[in-house]
Image: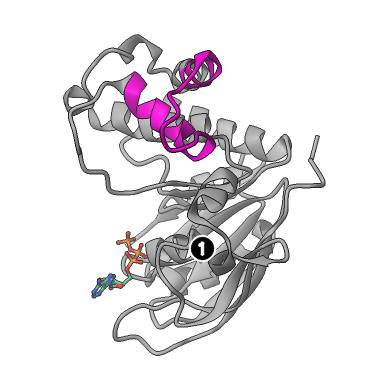
Amino acid sequence: MVDPVTPPLVARHLVIDVPGRADGDALNLEVKAGQVWGVLGPNGAGKTTLLHTLAGLRPPRAGEVLLGEAPLASLRRREVARRLGLVFQERHDGFPSTVLETALIGRHPWLSPWQMEDGEDLRLAEAALKRLDVAHLAERLVSTLSGGERQRLAIATVLTQAPAIWLADEPTNHLDLHHQTAVMALLNELAAEGRSVMMCLHDLNLAGRWCDHLLLLYPDGQACWGPAQEMLVPEALERLYGQRLASAEIDGAPVFVAVS
Ligand SMILES: Nc1ncnc2c1ncn2[C@@H]1O[C@H](COP(=O)(O)OP(=O)(O)OP(=O)(O)O)[C@@H](O)[C@H]1O
């Protein structure tokens, strides 16, 4: 069921600030409840910069980001964190902490400054760890996890945060095929429940199978966006990546293979 009260994430005349690059096309789009957006583009095109700008972590060069009618810049950080979650591409260990303690950080936007997590917070964190198949690692130090286990913990932490809007920077990084599929299924399920998702992807085949909208970011700042089936045009993708592609349809979804 799509929850009609989840406000859209709106980019209005938005120009992201990629150092040394001309402005390119301003983005005018809405990521609505129930939608799953993929952001595609070659290395350095600005995908991470876009996600960080949409999350309010870096200012745009021009234009604005809104949550529904409210400019992101007018909202308090805690309010933003209750409504919007970001799965980062890069993670650095701070204090030594366990997997469960890390997942519980997702509850912080919901607690007052000196309030401790309670049983409900713990229940949410444990359910998220279980959903991401890392519950058996709950007492392990994060520093001992494999790359894929860390990635699943990062997603479990945002699941514990329970935002209506998910921004995910290459959420399938480090994941084996089974866990890639499980994570994409989870993000689709969250959208079907009324949340919205935007994720950066390098895998065209995941984009073709799991995203209903796509944003193509070109290295010169040009951009186009729309329903996935309109964006997954081989010629446009070949221009995007500077790479020849062969394509086919398998199991009802488009599949692309790079060819020399
Ligand atoms: N602080 C900075 N100073 C200078 N250049 C920067 C800075 N931050 C980002 N850039 C540059 O901005 C461009 C866009 O970076 P961004 O990380 O958004 O790209 P991306 O599309 O996510 O790339 P990738 O696919 O490699 O993850 C890159 O060329 C990057 O080197």
Write the residue at 72% across / 54% down. Answer: 7
Q: Is residue 191 above or below residue 254?
A: above
- Image location of residue 220, percent across then percent down: 40, 83
Tell me the kind of residue under disc 1. Leu
173 relative position to 123: left or right:
left
User: Quick check: is the Cβ at mark 1 less than 8 Å away from ligand 1?
Assistant: no
Q: Main secondary structure of the magenta part?
A: helix
Inspect this view and state whether residue 251 appears. Answer: no
- Give residue 226's quadrant in the image: bottom right
226 relative position to 129: left or right:
right
Outermost residue, bottom side: 22
**What scheme was used to colour the molecule?**
one colour
- Image location of residue 36, percent across then percent down: 63, 49
225 relative position to 237: left or right:
right
Write the residue at 42% across / 61% down. Answer: 52
- Image location of residue 74, percent across then percent down: 58, 67
Ligand 1 placement by image quarter: bottom left
* Count of numbered badges drawn on the protein: 1
Numbered range of the magenta stretch: 100-125
- Image location of residue 138, percent across then percent down: 33, 14
Residue count near mark 1 (Cα–Cα under 10 Å), binned few <14, some 14–19, many ≥20: many
Q: Is residue 133 magenta?
A: no
Q: Which residue is mark 1?
A: 54
